[in-house]
Image (cartoon, helix red, strand yellow):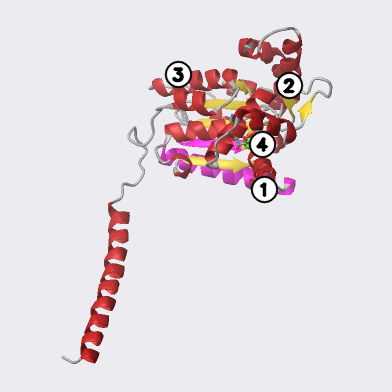
């Protein structure tokens, strides 16, 4: 064989090998796809596992919220015959960890986390923007909830920016959250509804400052200390929205304003995530530079919690 023929054969074999790899690669993807386990509405895919550790590790400075969430979720998941769906309402100012907490719940219940087809997320501002369309939104949402709970009784529905949701839409979903054995032949008792919003944020912040000024340690604050203050705002908000039926909500969960020590922790977490070695003094210096604190004289509470800490940190590091 002359050298040209040898080269041609070599090229042919190389291309062939690549094509085979390409072909078998595709085949493998396809095979993986059809043999990969789908997600099913059963205990193998939906259970409660690791939430306590995850909240303890990741949700900074929110001992009240962590305790209430854990008790609520554990009680609900251990009950084989709940009389109504679980309804949680998260309240607090921006950047205090409400979305984070809801993500931790999802992650520890659904094996597929936020990718689960049994978790449904809505943002009032994005999904229901036009007041003129509320009737359409309402019926679409009712249809969606009904269809998904029919498909999987353990479905979870998360509504963000709840304080901006039109009352008519809230009123439209209320029947799903009430004590009902069945509604149009569908049982909603194993579903979970979580509402997130800033309503009550100011008043939670005020009552935290009041107890701090009275010499009470943050860790000693209990749900009852915030509850009275929160109830007035929550009552105004939920009762008007729910047409005087706030009893569909099982737990009102306050998220306390974050203090400088928590911002320091958030910065540490971010730095580790960025692959940097956090130096405590430097982190404290950054906590003062990248975050605005109130009240002016005390500079104790971060106005925007840990929100935008990551982006400001990146900017600061440049
Ligand atoms: N308590 C917290 N512990 C740890 N990280 C936090 C905490 N609060 C906020 N963060 C971090 O700050 C960012 C914003 O938090 P998150 O989205 O949960 O705030 P939020 O309370 O939902 O705010 P908003 O009301 O504006 O939606 C996230 O990156 C989150 O990881
Ligand atoms: Mg949020």
Quarter location, residue 7: bottom left
Given residues 279 and 221, the one toward you in this image is: 279
Please state which of the two labelled residues, at mark 4 or mark 3, is closer to the viewer: 4
Question: Does the magenta-highlighted stretch encompass residue 166?
Answer: no
Mark 3: which secondary structure? Answer: helix
Please state which of the two labelled residues, at mark 2 or mark 3, is closer to the viewer: 2
Residue stretch in magenta: 131-159
Please report the residue visible at 66 percent of the width from the left and 35 percent of the height from the top.
Answer: 162
Residue count near mark 2 (Cα–Cα under 10 Å), binned few <14, some 14–19, many ≥20 = many
Q: Is mark 4 within 8 Å of ligand 1?
A: yes
Question: Residue 75: which disc?
Answer: 3
Residue 98 visible from this viewpoint: no
Mark 2: which secondary structure? Answer: helix
Given residues 80 and 178, the one toward you in this image is: 80
Tag 4 residue = 307
Relative to 64, does residue 163 appear above or below in the rendering? below
């Amino acid at each position: 064989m002359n050298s040209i023929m040898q080269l041609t054969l070599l090229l042919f074999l190389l291309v062939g090998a690549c094509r085979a790899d390409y072909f078998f690669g595709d085949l493998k993807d396809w095979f993986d796809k059809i043999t990969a386990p789908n997600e099913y509405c059963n205990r193998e895919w939906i259970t409660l596992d690791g939430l306590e550790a995850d909240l303890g590790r990741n949700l900074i400075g929110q001992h009240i919220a962590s305790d209430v969430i854990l008790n609520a979720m554990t009680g609900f998941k251990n009950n084989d015959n709940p009389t109504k769906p679980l309804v949680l309402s998260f309240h607090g100012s921006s950047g205090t960890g409400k979305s984070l907490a809801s993500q931790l719940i999802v992650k520890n219940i659904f094996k597929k986390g936020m990718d689960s087809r049994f978790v449904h997320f809505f943002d009032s501002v994005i999904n229901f923007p036009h007041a003129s369309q509320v009737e359409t939104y309402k019926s679409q949402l009712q249809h969606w909830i009904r269809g998904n709970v029919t498909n999987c009784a353990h479905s979870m529905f998360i509504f963000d920016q709840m304080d901006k949701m039109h009352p008519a839409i809230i009123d439209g979903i209320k029947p799903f959250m009430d004590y009902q054995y069945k509604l149009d032949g569908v049982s909603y008792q194993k579903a979970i509804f979580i509402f997130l919003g800033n309503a009550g944020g100011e008043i939670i912040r005020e009552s935290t400052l009041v107890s701090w000024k009275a010499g009470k340690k943050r860790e000693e604050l209990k749900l009852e200390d915030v509850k009275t203050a929160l109830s007035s705002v929550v009552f105004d908000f939920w009762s008007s929205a729910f047409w005087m039926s706030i009893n569909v909500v099982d737990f009102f969960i306050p998220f306390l304003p974050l203090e400088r020590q928590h911002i320091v922790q958030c910065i540490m977490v971010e730095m580790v995530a960025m692959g940097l070695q956090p130096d405590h003094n430097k982190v404290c210096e950054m906590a003062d530079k990248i975050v605005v604190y109130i009240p002016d004289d005390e500079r104790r509470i971060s106005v925007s919690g840990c929100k935008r800490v990551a982006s400001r940190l990146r900017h600061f590091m440049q």
